[in-house]
Amino acid sequence: MDGDADAAVESRIRIGWNKFRQLVPFLTNRDISLMRRGRLYSSCVQSSMLHGRDTWPVRKENEVALQRAEMRMVGWMCNVKVTDRVPDMELRQRLGIDDIILILQQNRMRWYRHVLRKEDNDWLKRCMGYEVEGSRPRGRPKRTWREVVQKDCQARNLNREDAMDRSRWNKLINIGW
C-alpha cells in the first residue's frame, strides 16, 4: 500500500455494487416509495461503501469515483437515464439521501473529534501526531489524513477547542447537510 486510499476506495465501491445488486429487487421496485428505497440504500449500500472511511486520506479522484458509483446506483433506483439530464441533487432529494462525500467528511470529523478528546498518553492520539523521519521521495508528497482533516476544519471554521464541546462540534460539522 502506498499510503493513499486508492485501493480501499476501489474495494469499497466493489462491495457497494455487490450489496446494491443483492438489493436490486427492492431498490428498483416501484411499489416501494422512493423515500423507503433511499433509507434502505443509505443503511445498506452507502454504509458498506463507507465502512472504515474515517482514516482514508482521500484525494479528489477518490471522491469522484465514490460519487460516480453512487449516482449510477441512484439513477438506477429512480429509473432515470443519463440522457434525461436530471440534476444529481434532485435525485438525492427524491430518495432523501445525502451526498456520499458530505457523509464521508462528517464521519471523518467525528473521528477526529474522538481522537482529540483522548488523553495525551493514549496510543491513538500519539499516532496522530507521529512524524516519520527521513527524506521523502521526489515529487509531490502523498496527501496525509491529517492534511485532509485540517482542510475539512478550515472549510467549517473549526479549531481544537471546539472539539471539547460535543454539541457545538456536532452542530458545526452538520452545517451544509
Image (cartoon, rainbow, N blue to C red):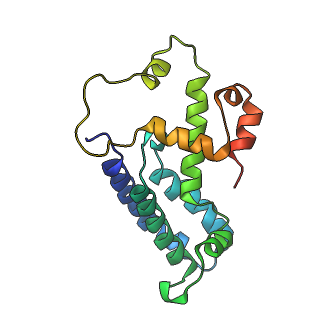
The percent position of residue 58, horizontal first and vertical second, equals 43, 48
Could you tell me which quadrant the N terminus lies in? top left
* Residue 91 falls in image quadrant: bottom right
**Position of 11 relative to 86 (above/below):** above
**Position of 171 relative to 159 (above/below):** below
Q: Residue at x 34, y 55 (%)?
A: 10
The percent position of residue 75, horizontal first and vertical second, equals 52, 76
* Residue 36 falls in image quadrant: bottom right
| Left-right relation of 17 to 37 | left
Q: Residue at x 70, y 47 (%)?
A: 174
Could you tell me which quadrant the C terminus lies in? bottom right
* Frontmost residue, 3 versus 68: 3
**Position of 146 relative to 98 (above/below):** above
* Residue 80 falls in image quadrant: bottom right
* Frontmost residue, 75 versus 138: 138
The percent position of residue 149, horizontal first and vertical second, equals 53, 39
The percent position of residue 159, horizontal first and vertical second, equals 65, 32
Q: Residue at x 65, y 75 (%)?
A: 90
* Frontmost residue, 6 versus 140: 140
Q: Residue at x 40, y 38 (%)?
A: 144
Report how many numbered discs are placed on residues in the image: 0
* Frontmost residue, 151 versus 127: 151
**Position of 113 relative to 59 (above/below):** above
| Left-right relation of 100 to 15 | right
Q: Residue furthest bottom?
A: 83
Q: Residue furthest top?
A: 121
